[in-house]
Image (tube, rainbow, N blue to C red):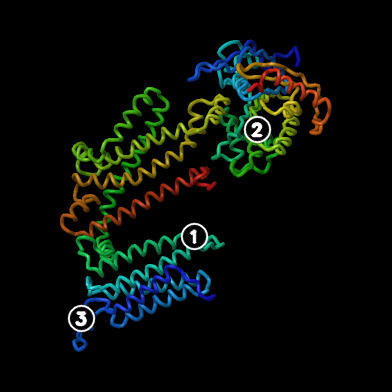
Amino acid sequence: MSGQSPAVVSASKLGLTFQTNDGPVQALSNVDLTIGKGEFVSFIGPSGCGKTTLLRVIADLEKPTSGTILVNGISPEQAREKRAYGYVFQAAALFPWRTIERNVALPLEIIGLSQAEQAERIKRTLELVNLSGFEKKYPWQLSGGMQQRASIARALAFDADLLLMDEPFGALDEIVRDHLNEQLLDLWDRTNKTICFVTHSIPEAVYLSTRIVVMSPRPGRVTDIIESTLPRKRPLDIRETPEFLAIAARVRDGLRAGHSYED
Amino acid sequence: MTWLKPSLQAVLALLLCLIAFALGAMSKPEAAALAQPTATIAYPYMGAKGLIIGLLLIAALVSMAKLTSIVEAIMLFVGAHAAAWLLIKGIAGFEGTALAPYFLLLAAAWLLAWRCVALLSALRPSQSVARNALRLVIPAIFGAWILIIWEAVTRGAGIPFILLPPPSAIGARIANSLPILGSDVRQTIFKAVLVGYVVGNLAGFIVAILADRVPFLRRGLLPIGNMVSALPIIGVAPIMVMWFGFDWPSKAAVVIIMTFFPMLVNTVAGLAASGHMERDLMRTYASGYWPTLLKLRLPAAMPFIFNALKINSTLALIGAIVAEFFGTPVVGMGFRISTEVGRMNIDMVWAEIAVAALAGSVFYGVVALVERAVTFWHPSVRGG
């Protein structure tokens, strides 16, 4: 976090109430949050705590019903129109009628890049996620982990400074997940992007983040924000260190304090 | 016994052959000849009877021996079809005189052909050429036997020509009437069906896009569209003839009305088929209506659109043929069917039906092939 450069995301008193058939549901309540450039912020909490909703508000996929939120100093809608962020969904959401390289090219076609620039960015981002050689494959010919890597490549090809990731590795097995976590950290380190990462895994949150936002449900709110003391370079075995375990314990305490497990 | 592996069809065929042999006379003239040994009465199967029974017996017995499937299948194929051919050839000139053994032998031959197809279906050849050949041979044998039984029964039992002509007569009629059939196909299929199909599908597609783009059309037009599609479309054929005259445009108009709504309804459903996540994705790219439509929603709608195209390929043919019943110049498949029925030329009616069935299959097949190429990515096409 740096005080000088403008915050990438700044929310104050943010609230969002869904109108459902069973009456209003308060998905977010009184969220105050500032995310600085280059941070890796994880949102963790049980299902229904509004962590995905918060990410979707940042992405302008939901409109808040109270409070204010700014992305790069402008409204989320303006930021979206300016293509300020890349978004990685829970599933890869690749288009099955496009090859991997055409999938990565999709956002580039929409913003109207030249063929040469598209080709250059496809090559670079597929290398970044270790998918070189799979350009001509269709998504359904690849494993789940490779598909999710392709969808990360698609978000990276966009080349926005902010990367929003909604449980991107939730559906993958632990071995693949460890591997992708490592690659993601490496990528963050090299590109200096700001990453907002939603997860429900405590080790994943602690391993990846510079800051962990602990949330709790009914209504969805922030109960704790934990600054990580871990170094920027993190080998996988850092997860056995006492420092790591201490942070994980604090996250767990935060989740418990939010009465997340009451039912 | 280790060298025998009995199969239901072969055992039954053997039994039928033995019963047929025990019953004796294959036809009424033969029965008469047997009753009066001194008179010289010509009767069918004078020399061939033993050959037919022998062929069937050998094929049935060999099929139960421990041989490779392919050898068995070939033996069965040859035996069953040679016997069937001899049966049908022998009854020529003696139509309607067949007795029980004729039908028993026919049934025995059919059972062996069944066994043959069953053996072929169980084959799993490793070469793709052989696999493709099998994919053609199995339905071909199946279809051939529909024709063989049709031919043998109509001739053996002497079914009146008016009720059901044998396929050989229909084939002969097709061969002799190629110019007439050709002009009918040109009139009905190349003018009415194709024009109506293209215009109807295109109109349905464009209106679906409009309804998607303009909310009031979606709210107002679709319910009315559903109501109109419930109307008996064929009932409007006479009105179309009044409006557009006797020639093919009135038939094309009926086809347009018939094909419009399946395309409209399917395209509207297809445009809603893309997932929320994919649409959110396009939103995060700040993609406008048209890029989202072209890059996401239309490709995702393709399986639905091809469904409509396939449904419409048969609807269009039905619509054009039936519409011709209500007034047409003296050419066209529907016209030919309705007039030749009146003139008791049932073989010509069947010839038109056969041509329509062939044209409809080709039409459907072409659409299905294009579908496979376009929706190669869909789980139903790529298989898994």
Mark 1 lies on a secondary structure that is: helix
Residue B358 position within the rendered picture, expressed as x and y whole percent measured from the top left: 34, 55
Q: Give the x, y percent position of residue B352.
A: 26, 55
Please, which residue is most extreme toward the bottom here?
B38
The answer to whether the residues at label 1 and label 3 have Cβ atoms under 8 Å apart is no
Image height of A194 relative to B43, above or below: above
Q: Please give the label number shown on residue A170.
A: 2
Question: Residue drawn at (56%, 36%), measured in percent from left and top?
Answer: A95
Q: Which secondary structure, mark 3? A: helix
Circle 2 residues within 10 Å: few <14, some 14–19, many ≥20: some
Residue at x 23% of width, y 59% of height: B348
Distance of mark 1 from mark 3, alpha carbons?
51 Å
Classify B224 as above or below B131. Answer: above
Can you tell which mark lies on residue B32? Answer: 3
Residue A233 picture quarter? top right
| Amino acid type indicated by mark 3 | Ala
Disc 3: which chain? B
Pair 1/2: label in front: 2
Q: Position of residue B261 (x, y in %)?
A: 34, 36
Question: In the rendered view, does B192 fall on the left or right side of B369?
Answer: left
Mark positioned earlier in the residue sequence (1 or 3) = 3
A48 or A41, which lies in front? A48
Which chain is mark 1 on? B
Specify the amino acid type for callout 1.
Asn
